[in-house]
Every structure is written in structure tokens, then in C-alpha cells.
Image (tube, rainbow, N blue to C red):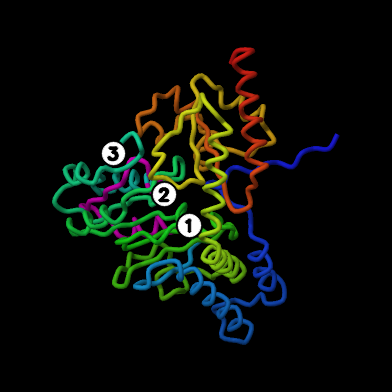
Amino acid sequence: MAVSEPIYLDYQATTPLAPEARLAMLPYLESQFGNPHSAHAMGRVAAAAVELARDRVASLLPSDGRTFFTSGATEAINWAIKGSMAPGKVLAVSAIEHAAVLDTAAWLGGQGVTVVTLPVNAEGLIDVDKAAGLLPKRVDLMCVMQVNNEIGTIQPVAELAALAHARGGLLLCDAVQAYGRLAAPVGADMIAISAHKIHGPKGIGALWLRDGVRPEPLLHGGGQQGGLRSGTLAPALCAGFGVAAALAAENVGADEAHICALADHLWARLGDGWKCNGSRAARWPGNLNISQEGVDIARLMSDVRGVMFSAGSACASGSGRPSHVLQAIGLPVAAAKSSIRLGLGRYTTMEQVERAADLINDAVHQQRQWGA
């Protein structure tokens, strides 16, 4: 009997590499392997590829800043935060930020930085007025995700940026889940993004800095990228990122319409019994985080091995701890541990979501019938 192709529904963790991005990378993995920081002809070819890619990536970001390539969003976030902080400064973070923000904030808290955590409501949204009441008169940096990676909530970044600016500080936006899908966050002073979330290669991301914003370098060495981010750039990764960004810009409307249709059909097909975690209105539709009371998620994932989905953030997978995001929106531990995340994207088909919904529901039914 033929084995069915796996159904990939984990687009928040990573996305398939676009064929166009792969083709763009190949010359720089083969014949055009020069160092982009070398002055000879091969180096100049590689450098030109890097700068073309930088322009393509930057085309989806505000025009009043500069884009610096990094090894990924984690490096970009660490650079932005650590490069802006010092003992005695104040850092504000939302309670549902990615671990790259929260773990960095925790580390800085032990280095003399004051860390203020901004709570969210049951929909996963920061109440701007409540946040204002929690913050001291001076805030040096605020960190807010544009789209949450676990529940898809879209934060009011513009209002929070205005609040940070009114307190004399800057705003860093983790736009990893929004870049190429939504307009760039308004008011942000620093924006972290990642290639592999938009059908580009893994191992490359970027930090956008508004003109005049210069966090201290995280890496020191050869002084590449204007001395702010040392290290030899990989032209192949840059080229793949650039083409992925160009494709995102070209397909943004079609991608959103396709994903909205998939999400509506998937939610309807799953049917009663499932509860949506987070806001239904203020969310990216490609992220469906749902729970059902009493479901053993580890068993569910084992029983539905042909469907690639997640029990939460890929970065925290296997920790055994309930999601800090789901706890922050008020879910009891049992409900948080009975939640799954289904991620949809450009290459997901309607047939796949139908098949996945049926397989998941059948497995839940078996749990109910035989006892979890």
C-alpha cells in the first residue's frame, strides 16, 4: 500500500524553501564562491549579490533605516537588546515574547538592568493604558512581537511604540512571523526578521535599524557591515533570502487570500469541541492554536504521525513545560497541555487541511473511546 505524503502544518516553526530561492543560491555554492569582502573580481560578484539581496529584503521594511544581515532572528534580537542596555537602564518586554527576548531579558536582569514585564489579556493583547500604568517614567527599550509565534495575536505596535517614545525609549519589534505577510510595524526603531519563515534558507536573518539608532555591536572582528556586525557573509544565504523577500512582496495578496480560505475551511472541518486560543479577530489567520479538554497531545502527535503540527513553539519543543504564552492568556495548565498549533502557508492545499482535520479528529475520537 502506498504511503501518503506527509502533511506539513507547522509554518510557524519553518517554511519550505521556495524553488526560486534555491535556484538563486546555487551559483554561490558552486562557481561563484568568492568572499564578498574580497576586492578581486569574484569577491565583487559576491558583494553585488549580497547588496541586491539586502535591497530586496529592505524593500519590505521602512525606508528610513538600514538592514544588517545576521545569522538569524535570535542574533538580531540579542544584538538589539544587549547593544541597547547597560546597568541601571530599564527594559520592558511583553509576557508572550519569544524566548530570544525573554531569556535575554532574564540574563540582563542579573546584570543590573531593570526588567518590566507587560501582561496580556485573554486574547493575548497588550492593553496600552494598563501598560502605561505599569511602566516607570523612563523606559530605555520596549520589546513587542508584531505577530505572536504561538497564538498568532497581532499586537498594537504603533501605539506601544508611541508609549515607548513618550518614555524616552526605543521599540524593538520581533517581526519574524509578520515579515512578508503584513505591513512593516509602524513606529518601531529596530525590527528583527528571519529568512526561513518566508520560504528562504535557514541560518540568516536581519536587523533593521532606524536612521540614527546604533546599538553596540554584539560581534567584533573584521568590521564588516559598517563595523556594526562583523563576520563574513554567506552570499548564497543572502541571495536566497533576497529572492524569498521578493516573492513575498509579489505574492502577499494571493498568499493572504489563500491562507484565509484554508484557515476558514480547517476551522469548520475540525468542528465542535475545539476552542481557539487567543484572539479570533486580531490574529494572523495562518496560525490556528486550538485546545480540547482532556486530549493527550503527546499521544495525539504519535497517532497522527503523517501530519506535521506542533504543541507550541519549536524552540520549546520537548521541554515538557506548559507554554508560557498560553499561561499568560489565562489558560489553566491542563488546557495549555491539551493545545496544538496548526500552521498554514503558501504551499498548503485544501485537500491537505481536510485530510489533516479528519485524521486529528479521528485520533481524538479514539482517545475518547478507549480512554486517554
Amino acid type at circle 3 is: Pro
Q: Residue at x 63, y 13 (%)?
A: 369
Report which residue position mark 2 lands on. Answer: 147
Q: Quadrant of the C terminus?
A: top right
Mark 1–mark 2 CB contact (< 8 Å): yes
Residue stretch rendered in magenta on the structure: 72-101
Magenta stretch holds residue 18? no
Comes first in the chain, label 3 or label 2: 3
Q: Residue 74, can we see it? A: no
Query: What label does residue 230 carry, if any?
Result: none
Q: Secondary structure at mark 2?
A: loop
Q: Residue at x 45, y 66 (%)?
A: 60
Q: Residues within 10 Å of mark 1 (few under 14, many from 20)?
A: some
Magenta stretch holds residue 75? yes
Q: Is residue 320 above or below residue 166?
A: above
In terms of image quadrants, where is residue 84?
Answer: bottom left
Image x and y of residue 313, in percent: 50, 40
